[in-house]
Image (cartoon, rainbow, N blue to C red):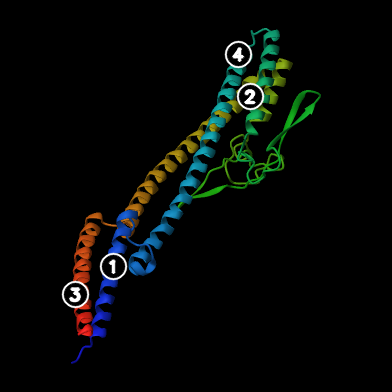
Amino acid sequence: MRISTAGLLRTSVFNIQKHFERLADNQEQLASGIRVQLPSDDPVATQRILSWRKVRDNIGQHHRNISSAQIWLNTTETMVSSIQDLVERAYELALGASNELLPQTVRQTYSEDIDTILKEVLRLSNQVIDDFYLLGGHQSDVTPFSAVTAGTTIVSVDYNGNGGQRDVELSPQTTMTINTLGSNDRDDDGIADDAIPAVLRDANLGIDVFDTLIDLRDDMIAGNVPNILNNRLPEMEAIIDNLALHRSEIGLKLQSVDLIQDIISQEELDVNVDIQQNEQADYATVVSNISYEQTIYQAANVTTSRLIQGSLFDFLQ
């Protein structure tokens, strides 16, 4: 087979160019630390990288959901804890007021303290986070609990929320309800409209923190000791138990959220390792490749230059 000088030169130049491109590619990998710059660099690795990046994006969204859930649950737990402390203080005052030997003037002073507690419980029950009321269900444009007053005196409290639940996806396998229902008696008729347990007014349990505090205040003003002893104290005990139950449930949810956060954080680390293994350059391999390609490139340059010189000499002869 005859090979022309021109053909041989073309082949030599093509091979030099090929090794030069490989050398440049390895130098780029060394500088950037990235092995797969384009899908054509490694189609299989590219597919894996895109798949793991999608998983990582989903994990990022779950991290944000978890953060929101933690803020919501912690704020709710603090609110319920504060209300429980207030009701327990009211219970102590009720115990004192149930003593028939207590002077009515002291009982009257206690009633003023109960009225202050009532107003503070009402204020806490209307807390907002991220423009949403904690106890309002899906109602975000009105306060969950509003006072009905006679002059400056609160005579009743209406519920304006609904039974909506706020569900958050914490992981692909876990969705959690993060809100606590303020009342399951949406039309304030004493009948539960929702089977979901409520923290302040639960018609299924027959408890209402606002009505009890209002009645306790009025009983103290009237000096109605039997009512305080036989009705208000048992009602408050049930309210305190219900508040403690909701605090416990919120605490369990927070523990679950923390556990899920640990799990997906580990998943995120694993995903990042997989991405790095497919995407990032192996420095030892790259340095070895550069050395190899430099040797081949330089040798090809030398032999080709000699070939060109020989061909030129033949031409001049």
Up/down of 170 relative to 119, above or below: below
* Corner quadrant of residue 199: top right
- Could you tell me which secondary element the residue under label 3 belongs to? helix
Give 283 or 167, whichever is nearer the viewer. Answer: 283
Q: Are marks 2 and 3 in contact (CB under 8 Å)?
A: no
Residue at the (66%, 14%) spot, across then down: 110
Q: As shown in the figure, which amino acid type bears the numbered disc 1?
A: Phe
Find residue 20 and name its label. 1
Which circle marks residue 96 in the picture? Answer: 4
Q: CA distance from mark 2 to mark 1?
A: 91 Å
Label 1 – label 3 distance at C-alpha: 19 Å
Q: Is residue 173 visible?
A: no
**For the residues marked 4 and 3, what is the alpha-carbon distance in whole angstroms?**
112 Å
Q: CA distance from mark 4 to mark 2?
A: 12 Å
CB contact under 8 Å: marks 1 and 3: no
Q: Amino acid at mark 4?
A: Gly
Query: What secondary structure is found at the residue carrying circle 2?
Result: helix
* Comparing labels 1 and 3, the label whose residue is closer to the camera: 3
Q: State the quadrant of the C terminus.
A: bottom left
The mark found on residue 175 in the picture is: none
The answer to whether marks 1 and 4 mark residues whose Cβ atoms lie closer than 8 Å is no
Q: Position of residue 231 (x, y in %)?
A: 64, 25
Q: Which residue is mark 3?
A: 306
Q: Nearer the viewer, residue 28 or 96?
A: 28
Is 4 placed above or below 152 here? Answer: below
Labels 4 and 3: the sequence-earlier one: 4
The mark closer to the camera, 2 or 1, is: 1
Image coordinates for residue 119, horizontal then vertical, percent: 68, 25
